[in-house]
């Protein structure tokens, strides 16, 4: 763990970590409140899937643009701009809910706007970390801690949302999220960062995106790992959209039960990130990624069929652990091996795979759950993850040899 803590020697990273903590707590509080509000108004599994789909589908279209902008412009200014748009979205949603005129179509529209903000923000945020921690030796720990705070938000945010909904309303959750984003803007403005040299935006955007895609396709780790990340995102992460059904129908609970279930997944994810952060360097991650895909699949199958609360909590914790091994393990490899001038675009492709496939999966899962039930839907998704893990495992010798060669060229770890 001491290796990850070295990133905190940099003042900018400390500020960023604190700001991220506030922002992500607010984001997850709002996400859970939106899902609960939709389910309270409609009781529809299909509309839960539609809402999750609407909040994340923009990632497929806007994340590559966010990555291109991150390579061409000042990442701190872009970061502040996305947070400002998030403030407007959250406060507008709070105003509609407080005035008791909120309708499902309005929630879906607001979910789309939130998705656009997240799509442009995520690759900017991921590539921004490299400016806060200039040492490649300390960068893997910083990436792990960045992921840790994201999953801490996933773990704590739903519990906060459940509590706030119980004692106040969904509207207060939206207001709290808007205030958290204002705090982030202030914190990022306090950072002292040397303006990096960026490539002049003379080439057309489509050409810039094509250059990034060609570069990504030339690297074997990206060609092999992006598909498994996309598979896990499509098949495993839709459990989040269906969770209100398990909370209300399987375990006969309320918003607090929803917070416990999602919080358990977040606890598993945070445990995975602590494990990654405790590693000395990035060597050996490929095998962990294959194991994580297998673990996520098997545990999701158990969760889908379980009717026992303690077993379901344990299973969804392992699902969160496995998903994080796949997602953040891949992110660590990518951010270590890619060239800085292509980093934003490569991480935007990762964002599309890790976050952009999730809305498609949520939409399909919501529709399928309406037909065969939420439990059977998650069981089928878990089985597909197991198959993907087996396929990746067979490619491990070739993948590890290629990554090892790149690490030696970069001077990462010991020969």
Image (cartoon, rainbow, N blue to C red):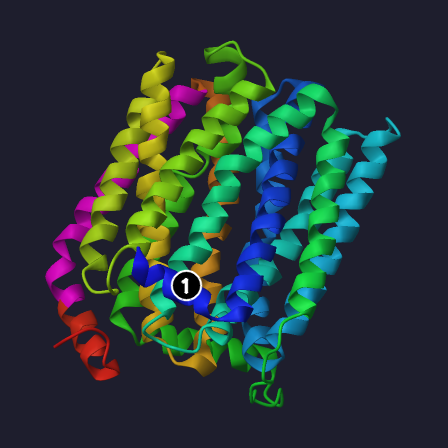
- The foreground one among 9 and 366 is 9
Name which residue lies at 20% across and 73% down.
413
Name which residue lies at 23% across and 81% down.
411
Q: Is residue 20 above or below residue 188?
A: above
Tag 1 secondary structure: helix
Dot 1 surroundings within 10 Å: few (below 14), some, or many (20 or more)?
A: many
Query: Disc 1 designates what residue?
Result: 142
User: Which percent across, then down, holds residue 380?
Assistant: 33, 29
- The foreground one among 114 and 288 is 288
Q: Is residue 11 above or below residue 327?
A: below
Name which quarter of the figure residue 407 lies in: bottom left
Q: Is residue 315 left or right of residue 101?
A: left
Residue stretch rendered in magenta on the structure: 374-400
User: Which percent across, then down, holds residue 386?
Assistant: 23, 38
User: Which percent across, then down, holds residue 86?
Assistant: 71, 53
Q: Is residue 300 left or right of residue 159?
A: left
Name which quarter of the figure residue 319 lies in: top left
């Amino acid at each position: 763990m001491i290796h990850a803590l070295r990133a905190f020697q940099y003042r900018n990273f400390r500020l960023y970590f604190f700001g991220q903590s506030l922002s992500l707590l607010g984001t997850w509080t709002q996400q859970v409140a939106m899902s609960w509000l939709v389910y309270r108004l409609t009781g529809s599994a299909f509309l839960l899937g539609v809402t999750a789909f609407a909040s994340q589908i923009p990632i497929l279209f806007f994340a590559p643009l966010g990555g291109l902008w991150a390579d061409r412009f000042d990442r701190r200014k872009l970061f502040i701009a996305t947070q400002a748009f998030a403030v407007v979205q959250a406060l507008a949603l709070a105003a509609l809910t407080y005035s008791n005129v909120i309708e499902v179509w309005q929630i879906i529209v607001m979910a789309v706007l939130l998705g656009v903000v997240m799509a442009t923000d995520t690759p900017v945020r991921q590539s921004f970390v490299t400016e806060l921690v200039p040492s490649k030796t300390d960068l893997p720990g910083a990436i792990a801690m960045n992921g840790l705070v994201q999953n801490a938000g996933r773990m704590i945010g739903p519990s906060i949302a459940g509590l706030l909904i119980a004692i106040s309303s969904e509207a207060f959750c939206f207001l709290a999220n808007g205030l958290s984003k204002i705090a982030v803007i202030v914190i990022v403005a306090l950072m002292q960062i040397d303006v990096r040299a960026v490539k002049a935006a003379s080439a057309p955007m489509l050409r810039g995106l094509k250059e990034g895609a060609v570069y990504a396709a030339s690297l074997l780790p990206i060609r092999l790992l992006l598909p498994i990340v996309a598979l896990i995102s499509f098949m495993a992460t839709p459990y989040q959209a269906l969770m209100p059904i398990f909370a209300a129908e399987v375990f006969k609970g309320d918003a607090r039960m929803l917070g416990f279930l999602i919080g358990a997944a977040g606890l598993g994810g945070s445990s995975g990130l602590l494990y990654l952060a405790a590693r000395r360097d990035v060597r050996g991650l490929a095998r962990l990624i294959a194991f994580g895909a297998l673990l996520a699949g098997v545990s999701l199958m158990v969760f889908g069929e379980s009717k026992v609360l303690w077993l379901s909590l344990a299973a969804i914790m392992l699902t969160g652990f496995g998903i994080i091994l796949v997602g953040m393990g891949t992110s660590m490899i990518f951010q270590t091996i890619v060239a800085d001038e292509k980093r934003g675009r490569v991480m935007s492709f990762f964002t599309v795979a890790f976050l952009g496939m999730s809305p498609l999966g949520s939409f399909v899962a919501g529709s399928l759950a309406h037909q065969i039930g939420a439990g059977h839907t998650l069981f089928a998704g878990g089985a597909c993850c197991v198959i993907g893990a087996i396929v990746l495992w067979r490619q491990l010798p070739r993948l590890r040899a290629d990554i090892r060669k790149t690490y030696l060229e970069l001077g990462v770890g010991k020969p």
